[in-house]
Image (cartoon, grey):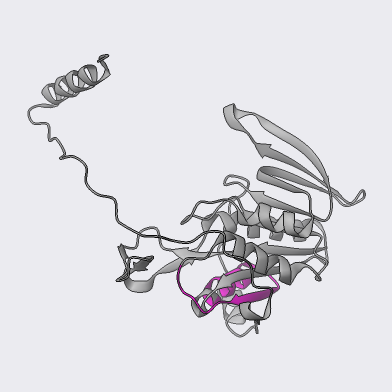
Amino acid sequence: MKLLVCVKQIPDPDAPVRVNADGGWVDIDGGTFVMNRFDGFALEEALRIREEIPDTRIDVVSVGPERVEAVLRRSLGMGADHGIHILTESDGYLDPFATATWIAEYARTCNYDLILTGVMSGDDMNGQVGPLVAEMLHLPCATSVIFRRMMPESGRIYVEREMEGGLRDALEIKLPALLTLQSGINQPRYPSLSRMLRANRHPLDKVLSGSLELPPLHLSILETTLPQKMRAGLILEGTAREKANQLLDILQNRSMPL
């Protein structure tokens, strides 16, 4: 089998964020970036498929500026076979339609049996890139997948999607297909030292985004602002019992109909 895993580099959730000078996007203090944790589940599931089906090849692709190379190196350290970097000039906001267009353009002639992505990214939380890539490549797509079972004898994959209310949607999908994976489907492994040493020497395919079809911009940032403090906080004083009684009074008064 031939698998493609889409990974994204996002700002470290614990890193301080500030709006940049022109108010168009944000700057990350210290420039700390990490792999999107949802994409970690997608890569781990690809590695488990390779353990089940020998001779499976795993490619990883990421879109972004030069710094994105780090997340591809980490993916190789976890066990992926090859990395593709779709290099962009901009270090700012990327329209998910543009990201999906570039990934689809690259993957169109590669004959992947299965494309895996995380259910969403931890920064934008749009959850759009995976389904958009599937639509552009005319592939069946299942989102929020929490369980999968390969059916190589029939060229299909069985998946269960997480639904509201604890329900699951069960599907059998003909390959090739695209899945977006939900957290909880597995526990991603850590890169090994020996693999990371090899990953740092492994050549990456670099594809200039300008060499691919230029997608129309569907989204643009008008202004970026930090949330404004709307009201002052209230500090409760006294013993634990007194604080509990004060809190109950506040909750009861706020729940009274006007």
Quarter of the figure with the C terminus: top left
Question: Residue 182 location, x and y as percent?
Answer: 60, 46
The picture quadrant where one finds residue 60 is bottom right
Left or right for 151, reference 122: right
Give above or below for 187 relative to 243.
Answer: below
Position of 134 with respect to 201 (left or right) is right
- Along the viewing direction, whichever of 191 and 23 lies nearer the viewer: 23
Residue at the image point whose x is 12% and y is 35% from the top: 235
Most foreground residue, 145 or 28: 28
- Measuring 57% from the left and 50% from the top, which residue is drawn there? 127
Per the image, is 75 magenta?
yes
Along the viewing direction, whichever of 91 and 215 lies nearer the viewer: 215
Q: How many numbered marks have been drawn onto this rendered protein structure?
A: 0
User: Which residue lies at the image location 58% right of the left edge and 70% below the top edge?
Assistant: 63
- Image spot of residue 193 (x, y percent): 55, 74
Q: Which residues are magenta?
A: 69-92
Occupied quadrant, residue 129: bottom right
**3 in magenta:** no
Can the viewer see residue 192?
no
Task: Point out residue 96 in the picture as x, y percentages from the top left corner.
Answer: 57, 60
Left or right, residue 138 beside residue 146: right
Q: Say which residue appears at 81% left-offset and 60% top-offset.
A: 113
Q: In which quarter of the view is residue 100 placed?
A: bottom right
